[in-house]
Structure formats: C-alpha cells, structure tokens
Image (cartoon, grey):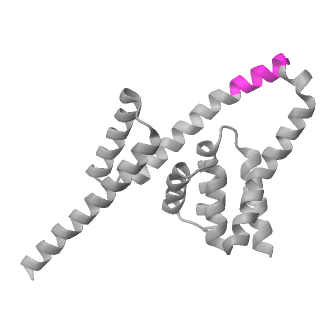
C-alpha cells in the first residue's frame, strides 16, 4: 500500500512541476523513476512514450498508467493515473473559478508567455535526449529522417507514420535476423 501512495505522490509531483505537456515531463519522469527510484529504465520510459504517442489519450496519463502497471498491476496503474491528473484537475478548477479576472491580467499573460518559451526549451532538450537514446543504428537514423521529412514536407498523418515505422522496424529486424542466421550457418 505504501508504494501505491508513493506512485500517486511522485506522479502528482511530476504533474505539479510540469508545464507544456507530456514531452516536457520526460526529464522529470526520467529523474524520478529511472534515476532515483530505478523503477523503470530510461529505455522503458522511451518505449512508454512511443506507445503513449500512438494510443488514444494524453501521453503523460498513458506513461503514468504504464509505469504504475509495471510496478503494481492494475491498482498501481489507477494510483499513478490519478496522481498525474490530480494536480491539473485542481489547477484547472481554481483557474475556472477565477477566470473572469484571470484572463485579462497582464501579469498572467506575461507569465504564460515566459512559460511557453521555457516549455519550447524543455521539449527541445527532451527531443535531443530521446534521439541520443533511440538512434543506435543507421536504420534508426534513416527512419527518424524519413519521418521528419514526411511530416514537415508532405504533412503525412502521424498515425500512418507510426504504423509504417512499426512494420518497417519489424521487417528490418526479421530480415536482419535471417541474414545473421544464414551467416552463422555458413560459419558453423
């Protein structure tokens, strides 16, 4: 039971400390869950982010659910999910109650402009860290570059890209294993 509350509190802490969504949250999740607690590896977190991107819902909620599920099964997933959404729920409720004076406040507008800029930096750092951890071969680099070009220049749907890359990854690795097996057979 103690670990369930710890999951809730750690995800609530991440939810309070993060502005800018799931990608901005990755450095905090990495520090808390991979480095400090060692409940998941950085590679597992990257995988959770990848799967969270292709499943319906908010990435941060999906990742919290995956981590909680790994630690404590369905109950852990529930506690983690509640932890990640609780701060946002409280903050949005307070903002909604104060919205009339809040929306036109010049200081709030300036603060949000600063936060948006900082979030861009956080997301950029997150992308660079994901690239370092994910691109371990020429094939992975090619997939990343093709994905970037497909989205930027041809406006290809992210769903199509994810499905195509999944099939590409499967095909590449199956062929790679067959070639290796044939080489091992020749050398034996």
Q: Is residue 154 above or below residue 71?
A: above
- Picture coordinates of residue 57 (x, y %)? 63, 49
The residue nearer to you, when weighing 71 against 32, is: 71
Q: Is residue 32 left or right of residue 128?
A: right
- Picture coordinates of residue 71 (x, y %)? 65, 72
Q: Quadrant of residue 79?
A: bottom right
Q: Quadrant of residue 21?
A: top right
Which residue is depicted at the point 80% across and 76% down?
A: 1
- Picture coordinates of residue 167 (x, y %)? 34, 55
What range is drawn magenta here? 104-114
Question: Which secondary structure dominates the residues rendered in magenta?
Answer: helix
Q: Is residue 145 left or right of residue 114?
A: left
Which residue is depicted at the point 38% across and 36% down?
A: 148
Which residue is depicted at the point 32% across and 60% down?
A: 170
Q: Is residue 52 above or below residue 73?
A: above
Q: Quadrant of residue 91?
A: top right
Which quarter shows the C terminus?
bottom left
């Amino acid at each position: 039971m103690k670990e369930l509350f710890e999951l809730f509190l750690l995800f609530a802490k991440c939810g309070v400390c993060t502005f800018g969504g799931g990608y901005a949250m990755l450095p905090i999740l990495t520090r808390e869950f991979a480095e400090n607690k060692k409940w998941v590896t950085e590679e597992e977190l990257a995988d959770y982010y990848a799967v969270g991107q292709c499943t319906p819902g908010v990435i941060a909620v999906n990742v919290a659910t995956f981590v909680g599920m790994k630690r404590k099964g369905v109950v852990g997933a529930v506690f983690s999910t509640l932890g990640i959404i609780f701060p946002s729920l409280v903050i949005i409720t307070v903002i909604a109650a104060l919205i009339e004076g809040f929306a036109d406040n010049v200081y709030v507008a300036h603060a949000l402009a600063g936060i948006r800029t900082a979030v861009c930096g956080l997301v950029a750092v997150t992308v660079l860290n994901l690239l370092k951890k994910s691109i371990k071969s020429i094939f992975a680099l090619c997939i990343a570059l093709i994905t970037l070009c497909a989205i930027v220049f041809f406006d290809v749907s992210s769903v199509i890209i994810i499905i195509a890359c999944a099939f590409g990854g499967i095909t590449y690795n199956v062929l790679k294993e067959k070639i290796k097996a044939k080489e091992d057979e020749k050398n034996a």
